[in-house]
Amino acid sequence: MSDVTVFSEWRDQPLEEILYQCRELAEDMDFPTVRRWREAGGKVLGHFQVYFPEEIAHAGGMLPFKVRGASVEATQADSRFGSYLCSILKTSLELALSGRVELDVFVTHPICDAARNLAAVWGRNVTYPCQILYLPQNANSQHATEYLRGEYDRVKRTVEAITGGSVTDAALRRSVEVFNENRALLRELYAIKRDTPWLVSAEDAYVLTAVGGLIPREEHNDLLRTTLPLIRASDAKQQDRIRVVFEGGFCEQPPLDLIRAIGRSCYVVDDDLLIGLRWILDDVPIDGDPLRNLAEAYLEQSSYSPVQHDLRKPKEKMLLKRIEDSGAQAAIVTAAKMCEPGLEEQVAYTRALDQESVPYFVSEFEENMTSFDHLEIQLETFVENLLFE
């Protein structure tokens, strides 16, 4: 299936048109690229936030589709859940119930109490398999790598059962190479954000990343290889804006309009938006056991998140390091409404920022937010106070 093209609208276009087509795809709740993949005979593995070893699905010839909620009304899914839950759970299931997305298997993770039950709820309402990938609860255990390799092997066997083929070590190594390139290109995109943020807006960097969860990685690599040099060659001028880190987009995603509104006041020089697509920070080794290499990379070469408990990566210190490494002057500390892990970390983050005298702006968001006027006014006041201190 690697020869199937599902997103061609950007090709042979100038930079502004490429970015426009990426925005259109990222906000299209009918997911045309997934539909095109299926129409060509391909199978789709949907995986919930935050991280999933997509190389395994890719090696089996499947399209790994990042299920991250959507800006839709949960008219059917709402009755399947209790009232006080984050909206990403409801809107994600709504995509399946409404027929916007057709999957062959769905995989979720016990990242919080609500997500822990998502596979069971999802499975009662669809005909295809729904599974939980149990990432290690104790990332510091000496047995974590071996345990996780076993979980990855279970996912591999699920892929084989669905596709009817064998996921060989050779296929996994080829997939690791594709994803290594993808992560390197995303690191280059984020280096542009950090070093010359006036060349790429917060929303454009976001959509360039987000489309990776909607198309085959080979296509995403082509897109980034073409677009990054065009961004670097842009003649955009630097403006007088403060440099900020955005923290709180690890699971439910803020509306693109909110990211756009923040970008009007600030340069977002680093963030944790869609961190699962950038979770592994270095190339995964090609030689050796590919499943073990992926497991070790998840544990040893990875970023941080409120939903991974690793004593070597205290969240507050990691946020402070992100701010320091990116040269940020302040932080925007957000959390999705009713997100227990995010709201808990928000308290710890703000305490650490207070101790280090780092200015910060606190907010909450929901993926279906439609009005940002009040928040944007507050943010503009925050920025003005910093500029004129």
Image (spheres, helix red, strand yellow):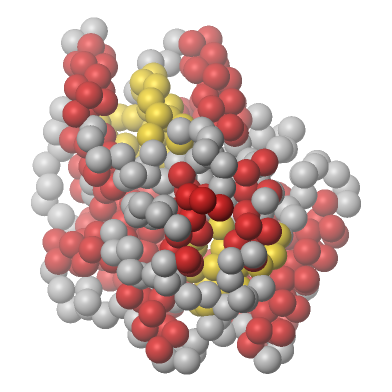
Q: How many marks?
A: 0
Q: Is residue 284 visible?
A: no
In the image, residue 146 above or below residue 384 = below
The residue most toward the right is: 143
Q: Residue at x 73, y 53 (%)?
A: 135
Q: Residue at x 22, y 73 (%)?
A: 10
In the image, residue 364 above or below residue 206 = above
The residue most toward the front is: 79
Q: Position of residue 168 (x, y in %)?
A: 71, 85
Q: Residue 220 falls in which quadrant of the image?
A: bottom left
Q: Residue at x 34, y 38 (%)?
A: 269
Left or right: 234 as drawn, with respect to 63: left
Left or right: 211 as drawn, with respect to 372: right
Of residues 34 and 57, the one drawn nearer to the viewer in this rendering = 34
Of residues 177 and 368, the one drawn nearer to the viewer in this rendering = 368
Q: Residue 311 falls in which quadrant of the image?
A: top right
Q: Residue 336 falls in which quadrant of the image?
A: top left
In the image, residue 80 above or below residue 342 = below
Q: Position of residue 369 (x, y in %)?
A: 31, 39
Q: Is residue 146 visible?
A: yes
Q: Quadrant of the C terminus?
A: top left
Of residues 284 and 83, the one drawn nearer to the viewer in this rendering = 83
Q: Residue at x 44, y 63 (%)?
A: 95
Q: Position of residue 9 (x, y in %)?
A: 22, 77
Q: Position of residue 368 (x, y in %)?
A: 34, 44
In the image, residue 82 above or below residue 335 = below
